[in-house]
Image (spheres, grey):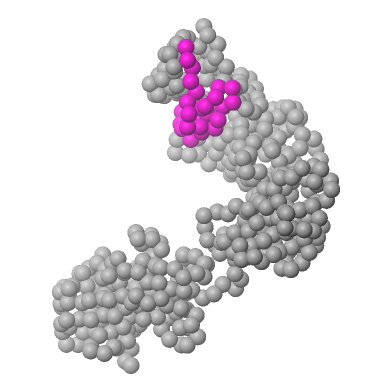
């Protein structure tokens, strides 16, 4: 068959009468308006409805026949060329353009084809590593070429078969990953009665994010009696550790169960692309010993967690020596600090944010003394500190307008409002930096971060409000005047 190669702006073997200038420093032809020799509807693009097995086609040396193209009228000497645009979403965000090869077909039609390995590469590098059959959104740009002249049909923004799809089965993955895994823990060797703890996972494909985490809880009596663990995939594949008493290492199929070496709660992470695991004791909170509390963990503010991975809370930072993150009140060697200085950023609203990674032994220091909202990821050791330059109250008493500023104590642990008139059944909240990204509501005796519910004060009156953030839960105290 005679083969006609697509227009490629970067690699054409011929010059264009209408677009033969090269944009300076870009190396691509300039495009000038051209009148098409035929009407747009004289060209028809019919996408294939087949499911293409890319590996099978590649092994057979065959192309992916993505569409057929016919022209009711085509002036003498003109040939058809096309590009295929593929995307994961209907809005064609992150769309990828593939160069098609044109092959003659019966009755004057032509076939638009792409090489299976080129389609695989575009899919793998730009969309997902998932090897399961998927459907892409597609559309086609069609060009007519004659000698030195080439014209895009319908103009630069026009596509044929603009709402079409293409179904493909990518090349197989080097390793099959199950969609879900379960940690089983039992006393003894009979896993038929094991405690089962499903791993959690992100919304991404397991081939793009092969990491799973789980928190397992058990009694101290069970731990003292001796516990064993194993991992079971959704497919039924059973994994154990390469070393039965190791808290991290390789996962292997068909090996004996591991020995649980840490007390409850146990936090385990697995990476099923590399078949590795790591577990450690999970902690109910992180202490923040530092200059502001005399380096006394028990007296420090606490970061709390709902998943034993992400810890958050308020911390006073005084930069004489800063502070550290520590799962213990004492100094048992598990404290976490920096290996390099925090990065400082100022947001559009003026809020100052510091970010870094607690993978070293240096103290955590900022450049501004005061109160911070701290976010700490125990798995990655990433830390983010948002400076709280103001705390205020907002609610029915001021029509939910600008926050009424609170005055901090010298140690930043209590913040007090001016006398404020509250109506009956007054709903209100605390918020930081006169913005809703950091706020507290709910129960005045146990304030909730970014809670949907308001704090409610039943009786009308004039009150001075004090916010106490020295320990969790944070509390609001109202003093009637």
Q: How many marks?
A: 0
Q: Position of residue 78 (x, y in %)?
A: 21, 84
Instruction: Answer with the quarter of the image where residue 415 lies.
Output: top right
- 50 is higher (above) or lower (below) than 422: below
Q: Is residue 438 magenta?
A: yes
Q: Position of residue 285 (x, y in %)?
A: 68, 37
In the picture as drawn, the residue positioned furthest to the bottom comes out as 1
Asked whether 396 or 435 is in front, the reply is 396
Q: Residue at x 24, y 67 (%)?
A: 158
Q: Residue at x 55, y 14 (%)?
A: 478
Q: Position of residue 430 (x, y in %)?
A: 50, 25
Position of residue 405 in the picture relative to residue 191 (left or right): left
Q: Is residue 136 visible?
A: yes
Q: Is residue 97 magenta?
A: no
Instruction: Answer with the quarter of the image where residue 449 lies.
Output: top right
Instruction: Answer with the quarter of the image where residue 174 lies.
Output: bottom right
Q: Residue at x 20, y 81 (%)?
A: 71
Position of residue 200 in the picture relative to residue 346 (left or right): right
In the picture as drawn, the residue positioned furthest to the right comes out as 225
Q: Quadrant of the N terminus?
A: bottom left
Q: Position of residue 217 (x, y in %)?
A: 71, 45
- 309 is higher (above) or lower (below) than 424: below
In the picture as drawn, the residue positioned furthest to the top comes out as 481
Asked whether 65 or 357 is in front, the reply is 65
Q: Is residue 148 visible?
A: no
Task: Write the start and end of the magenta stretch as one range.
Answer: 433-459
Position of residue 369 in the picture relative to residue 335 (left or right): left
Q: Residue at x 55, y 54 (%)?
A: 202
């Amino acid at each position: 068959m005679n083969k006609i190669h697509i227009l490629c702006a970067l690699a054409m073997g011929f010059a264009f009468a209408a677009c033969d200038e090269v944009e300076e420093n870009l190396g691509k032809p300039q495009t000038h308006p051209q009148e098409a020799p035929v009407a747009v509807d004289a060209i028809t693009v019919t996408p294939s409805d087949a499911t293409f097995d890319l590996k099978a086609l590649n092994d057979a040396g065959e192309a992916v026949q993505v569409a057929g193209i016919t022209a009711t009228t085509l002036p003498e000497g003109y040939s058809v060329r096309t590009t295929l645009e593929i995307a994961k979403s209907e809005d064609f965000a992150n769309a990828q353009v593939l160069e098609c090869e044109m092959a003659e077909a019966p009755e004057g039609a032509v076939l638009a084809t792409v090489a299976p390995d080129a389609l695989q590469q575009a899919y793998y590098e730009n969309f997902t590593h998932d090897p399961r059959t998927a459907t892409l959104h597609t559309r086609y740009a069609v060009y007519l070429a004659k000698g030195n002249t080439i014209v895009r049909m319908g103009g630069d923004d026009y596509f044929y078969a603009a709402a079409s799809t293409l179904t493909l089965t990518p090349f197989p993955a080097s390793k099959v990953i199950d969609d879900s895994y379960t940690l089983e823990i039992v006393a003894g060797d009979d896993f038929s009665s094991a405690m089962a703890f499903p791993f959690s996972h992100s919304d991404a494909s397991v081939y793009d994010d092969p990491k799973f985490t789980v928190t397992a809880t058990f009694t101290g009596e069970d731990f003292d009696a001796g516990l064993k663990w194993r991992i079971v995939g959704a497919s039924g594949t059973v994994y154990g550790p390469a070393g039965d008493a190791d808290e991290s290492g390789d996962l292997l199929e068909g090996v004996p169960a591991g020995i649980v070496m840490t007390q409850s709660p146990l936090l385990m992470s697995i990476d099923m692309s590399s078949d590795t695991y790591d577990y450690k004791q999970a902690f109910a909170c992180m202490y923040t010993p530092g200059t502001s509390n005399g380096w006394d963990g028990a007296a420090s503010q606490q970061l709390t967690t709902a998943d034993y991975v992400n810890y958050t809370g308020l911390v006073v930072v005084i930069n004489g020596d800063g502070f550290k993150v520590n799962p213990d009140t004492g100094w048992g060697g598990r404290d976490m600090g920096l290996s390099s200085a925090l990065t400082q950023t100022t947001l559009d609203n003026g809020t100052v944010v510091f970010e870094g990674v607690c993978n070293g032994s240096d103290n955590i220091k900022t450049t501004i003394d005061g109160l911070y909202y701290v976010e700490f990821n125990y798995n990655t050791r990433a830390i983010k500190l948002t400076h709280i330059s103001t705390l205020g109250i907002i609610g029915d008493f001021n029509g939910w307008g600008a926050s009424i500023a609170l005055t901090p104590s010298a140690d930043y642990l209590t913040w007090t409002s001016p006398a404020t008139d509250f109506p009956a059944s007054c709903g209100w909240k605390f918020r930081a930096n006169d913005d809703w990204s950091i706020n507290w509501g709910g129960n005045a005796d146990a304030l909730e971060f970014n809670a949907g519910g308001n704090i409610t004060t039943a009786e009308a009156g004039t009150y001075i409000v004090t916010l106490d953030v020295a320990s969790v839960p944070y509390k609001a105290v109202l003093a009637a005047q």
